[in-house]
Image (cartoon, helix red, strand yellow):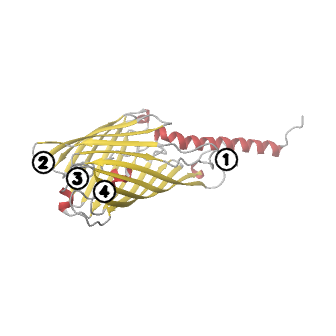
Amino acid sequence: MKPYTVNEHNEKRILVRKKIFHIIVFLLLMNEGQSQQNAQFTQYLFNQFGHHPALAGWRDCIEFRLGGRTQWVGFPGAPKTAFANFHTSLTRKKKGYLRSKHGVGANIESDQMGPWGMTRIYLAYAYHIPFNRKFKMSFGLYAGLQQYKLNVEDIVTEIADDNAITGKTNVFIYPDIWPSLFLYSNDFFAGATIRHIVRNKLRKITADSHLRYHYTITAGKRFPFGERRSIVPSINFKWASISAIELDLAAQLDFGNRFQIGLGWRNTDALFALARLNLGNLSFGYSFDWTTSKIKVGSANTHEVIIGINTCKKDMRNSDECPAFN
């Protein structure tokens, strides 16, 4: 048998390491569905448009949302998320409750986890129709691009200057579409969205890898009590075929649509508290998560801040107001 030369041995070692590297990247991408393939948010009611594009243009004004989340503070490589979005309705002539309308918007989201980063840019369209005198239904979708980026400089290898990992970054860009459906009234809401409907094949990672469907279902109802007070219990359900079910249960106390406080529980890793203050056309939201999973050994704190700005007139805010959006 012909012995390996030094060069042949090195080439074989590099080839093996490259295969291992691709497998690791693939597992990072696909197993995030079990932990964090899509960004996690505690204040899902304060950023419903970011989860359900069918809500684009539900109000006849422009709404902006800006937010950031620092998860597991102090934990090396922990997720950090930022987003910005806006949406508005298109002008229509028909008045009254039996009116349909169109909505448009855009959403930008960035999620960073150690060397692995994701950026998503979407345009949104929605069509709202009256279901009856009380309920309205909307259909919509996000269409855009998602970029996955691996910063090789942040990866520590066993061998310095390992030839299996070359360059500074690896970037993958894929198209993406999310269809969405939402039903709402002034005291109830329920919506469903499917992410990654295209199921892109990730051939730059491995020949057989692809994105999976990710399902999100949100629902809640307002129960008034006392004078201008109410409680809004809600549920946020997320699932992908490669992951465990993630379930958020929360309840918020609302004081005249001026101030809200709430508590909640996430089955995978946290108890959380949240608060929101509405000052005319400005809104400020904050939430704090207490980690309950094994990660609490390294970090038990997560902070999330969201700022809302709208151009709505006072009668727009008080007419047919839904607890999913106020």
First reached walking from the N terminus: tag 2 or tag 3: 2
Please name the residue that numbered disc 4 is placed on. 307
Q: Dividing the image into 4 quarters, which one contains the N terminus?
A: top right
Residue count near mark 2 (Cα–Cα under 10 Å), binned few <14, some 14–19, many ≥20: few
Residue 315 occupies quadrant: bottom left
SS under mark 3:
strand
- Relative to 310, say whether 80 is above or below: above
First reached walking from the N terminus: tag 1 or tag 2: 1
Q: Report, in whole angstroms, how far the alpha carbon at label 2 lies from the one at label 4.
A: 24 Å
Residue 174 percent coordinates (x, y):
55, 54
Q: On residue 204, which mark appears?
A: none
The amino acid type found where label 4 is placed reads: Ile
Residue 251 percent coordinates (x, y):
25, 40
Please name the residue that numbered disc 3 is placed on. 277
The amino acid type found where label 3 is placed reads: Leu
Residue count near mark 1 (Cα–Cα under 10 Å), binned few <14, some 14–19, many ≥20: few
The answer to whether one can see residue 47 in this image is no
Q: Report, in whole angstroms, how far the alpha carbon at label 4 lies from the one at label 1.
A: 44 Å
Q: Nearer the viewer, residue 104 or 5?
A: 104
Q: Nearer the viewer, residue 222 or 170?
A: 222
State which mark lies toward you, 3 or 1: 3
Residue 142 occupies quadrant: bottom left
First reached walking from the N terminus: tag 3 or tag 1: 1
Residue count near mark 3 (Cα–Cα under 10 Å), binned few <14, some 14–19, many ≥20: some
Please name the residue that numbered disc 1 is placed on. 160
Residue 243 percent coordinates (x, y):
48, 36
Question: Residue at point 12% right, 48% down?
Answer: 228
SS under mark 2:
loop
The amino acid type found where label 2 is placed reads: Arg
